[in-house]
Amino acid sequence: MDIKIRQATAEDLTAITTLFKDTVTTINSKDYNEKQITAWASVANDTAIWMERIENLYFIVAELDSKIVGFAYLKKGYYLDGLFVHKDHQREGIASALLRTIESQVMIEDFPEIRTDISITALPFFENKYYEIIKKQKKNLNGVVFVNYIATKTL
């Protein structure tokens, strides 16, 4: 499989928000209830925030045959704020390729570690990549409470 990683552009906005919504509603629904999924998926509707992320953050996409199949982005140079893979392309090495690129960028920026919040769904993936769980937390999104984890990895 030839996964191409590149910087996201404004033209990718629709593909990114559609992928996000589809992945959350399909993949994350096994670990979160309907109310949580609805609140989480609704984040895709705020295209202004997504455009700001694409334009101002280190935001990358993964492509297969010129189709976006995943994305990831960094805040503050060391905080992995999002990593999502298309619902039809899980377990194909896409998340690993994105994470390697993100971790490399964090090292280029000369940060000693990477930090992230991890969903229940993504927990096994990140544990397998040697991320250390700092704590379990409850986050509020649009009045709905979610459980996730704060994790870090020394680079």
Image: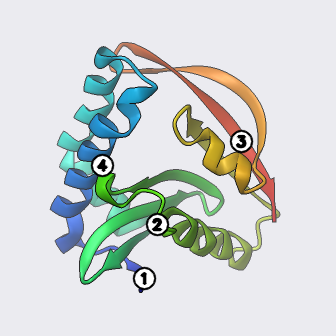
Q: What coloring was used for the rendering?
A: rainbow
Q: How far apart are the alpha carbons under marks 1 and 3?
A: 29 Å
Which of disc 2 and disc 4 is earlier in sequence? 4
Identify the residue position indicated by label 1 in the image: 1
- The local secondary structure at tag 4 comes to helix
- Asked whether 72 or 79 is in front, the reply is 72
Numbered circle sitting on residue 20: 4
Picture layout, residue 21 above or below residue 38 = below
Name the spot of residue 17 as percent of width and height, x first.
23, 52
Mark 1: which amino acid? Met
- Kindly identify the amino acid type of the residue bearing the numbered disc 4: Phe
Looking at the image, is mark 3 or mark 2 earlier in the sequence?
A: 2
- Location of mark 2 (residue): 92
**Residue 151, disc:** 3
Q: CA distance from mark 2 to mark 1?
A: 8 Å
Residue 21: x, y in percent?
25, 43
Q: Which quarter of the rendering shows the N terminus? A: bottom left
Circle nearer the viewer, 1 or 3: 1
| Alpha-carbon span between mark 4 and mark 1 | 22 Å
Q: CA distance from mark 3 to mark 2?
A: 23 Å
Quarter of the image with the C terminus is: bottom right
Between 64 and 61, which is closer to the camera in this rendering? Answer: 64
- Of the two numbered discs 1 and 3 on the same chain, state the one appearing first in sequence: 1
* Contact? badges 2 and 1 (CB < 8 Å): yes
Q: Amino acid at mark 3?
A: Ala
Quarter where residue 2 is shown = bottom left
